[in-house]
Amino acid sequence: MKLADLLEEFNVVIDTAEGLTELRSLILGLAVRGKLVPQDSNDEPASELLKKIEAEKERLYEKGEIRKPNDYPAIPEDEIPFEIPNNWVWARNGNLILFQNGYAFKSGRFQDSGIGVIRIGDLQNGQVVENSMKYISEDYASEVKNDYLIEQGDMLIAMSGATTGKLAINNSNKTYLLNQRVGKIDPIFINQDYLYRYLNTKIEENLAKSSGSAIPNLSTKQIGELEIPLPPLSEQHRIVKKIESLFAEVDELDAKLNRQGKLDEKLQLAVNAEVQKAPNADASKSVWNFITSNFDTLYHTPEAIDNLKKNILNEAVRGRLVPQNPNDEPASELLKKIEAEKERLYDEVEIRKPKDLPPVKEDEVPFEIPESWEWCRLGDSILDIYGGSTPSKSNPQYWNGEYYWASVKDLNDDQIYIDKTIDTITELAISKNKTKLVPADNVIVCTRMGLGKINLNTVEVSINQDLKALILPESVSHLFFFYVYKTLEIIGSGMTVSGIRQDELLKIPFQFPPLEEQHRIVRRIEELFAICDRFNDQLEQREKVNERLVKGLVGEVLEGN
């Protein structure tokens, strides 16, 4: 297969930014292997170019314009990364370039205007940017030799920090000075764009070679030792021209993908608007039926499906996902039963005295709900709330016992699950600490670390101090409560760890439907979520297939050129 054919295939197969990145990497991979453009027997071999570069370095050294060049050793046969054409050579980067390290400017003399100093943070997306650039005065600049001057077109490399190995070109017509830990790469008799393109493919390798545990670093020696596949100069020019031509085609694919993404987003917003404008549950159901019937046309990314799930929950908690039934017992009656149940449990000394919560004021109501529903406080819908604690880690009698003990790390995938990571504590730990067992099939929320998380525990479990157990009455569907809670805005406070006090949590306004409607809502949510999950699985499978196709096509091109 030829590269032109591959571009046609990508136009059909590719539908992700990652795929386009793969295509660009393929083009560069072909370029540096001599497979992007044909060789010309009339080109002067790269071996002769190498001799000219060496002679030029000697000339500059003898004139006193550069220091004595480092002589990097030849690349051993067993270290050659891949085969190249006969008229190419493998060379060390340091033998092809002049390299200049930056100057250690005194940070105390930086100012907001003057002559710009390029630091590692000023190399972004292949360019020199001035967003956070520091400057020095002309007097201070005059103390610095011209060696550190950066002019238009100069190539730079970051040598430490998070951007280690990243390259940039000074495309500005401004001149700057070079700060320490930034290096200037000055190719001799080499097409700079060719070298820039190749070194960009080596960034990951640069990072792997970089030293320093906390902050990665690249040394001048490491940069000089990089292996470069060197074509004849004329072929370098042809390669760069071809890369630019092919990248323009890839950019068009990228633009097409972006246009499609924007159209998808507009379409999804229009559909969401239709859902939200639906005057009643019947009209809303009609829109949802349209969505489920045209799912593969409307939703192409996992992010879009996640947003749809949020929309489903928002409609559910507004009473617009299923129709109301006038025969349902009103929510107001259920709340009376919960209040009576609390009084009974308190009289039997099974719970602490429930605190009276103020009614929800009109200005606290965020949206309208059906007549059979009630706005109440979250605390009105539960029987009891209690927290946990962490038994002393230094006491071996408390740990590795018969009872599960959960912390925030165990609240994943919307339920506490039992695997090798969950801790266990002993009966002694429970009796000696402020914790007790939460019955299975209950609700646990995070009020400090992991604030806003809610989970249904599948087993009896003890909890730590960052969690709260909400004990629900039979007149509340645990799953409905779970879904509503996920739509609440839980706002914490605190300087180090954001959290919410128990009394503030219980005061949050909570929408409460009749019990039968709670069950209908849960069934409808699960039905729609199942459709979302099915299409999400299909997207994942398609992505895997696309990845295999892309890699297969790439392999075909590499073998066929």
Image: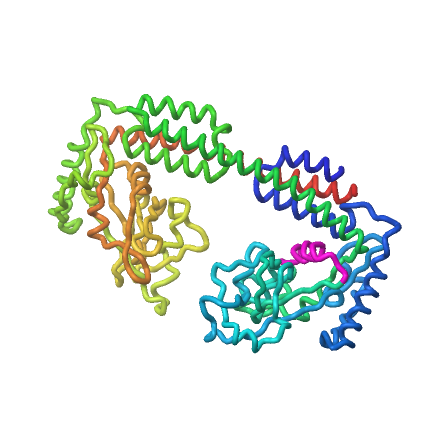
In this picture, which residue range is highlighted in magenta?
Answer: 189-204
Q: Is residue 281 above or below residue 156?
A: above
Decide: is 30 above or below 307.
Answer: below
Q: Is residue 168 visible?
A: no
How many marks the image carries: the answer is 0
Residue that extends furthest to the right in the rendered view of this protein: 41
Quadrant of the frame with the C terminus: top right
Q: Residue at x 76, y 51 (%)?
A: 237
* x and y, in percent, of residue 300 in the image: 51, 34
Predominant secondary structure, magenta span: helix
Nearest the viewer among 538 and 310 is 310
Please tell me which residue lies in front, 160 or 357: 160
Residue 287, how many percent across, how many down?
38, 24
Depth order, front residue of 555/134: 134
User: Is 296 colored magenta in this rendering?
Assistant: no
Q: Is residue 191 magenta?
A: yes
Determine which quarter of the picture holds residue 424.
bottom left
Q: Position of residue 427 (x, y in %)?
A: 31, 59
**Vertical comparison of 126 with 393: above or below:** above
Q: Is residue 233 left or right of residue 204?
A: right
Q: What residue is at 61 percent from the left and 38 percent from the top?
A: 252
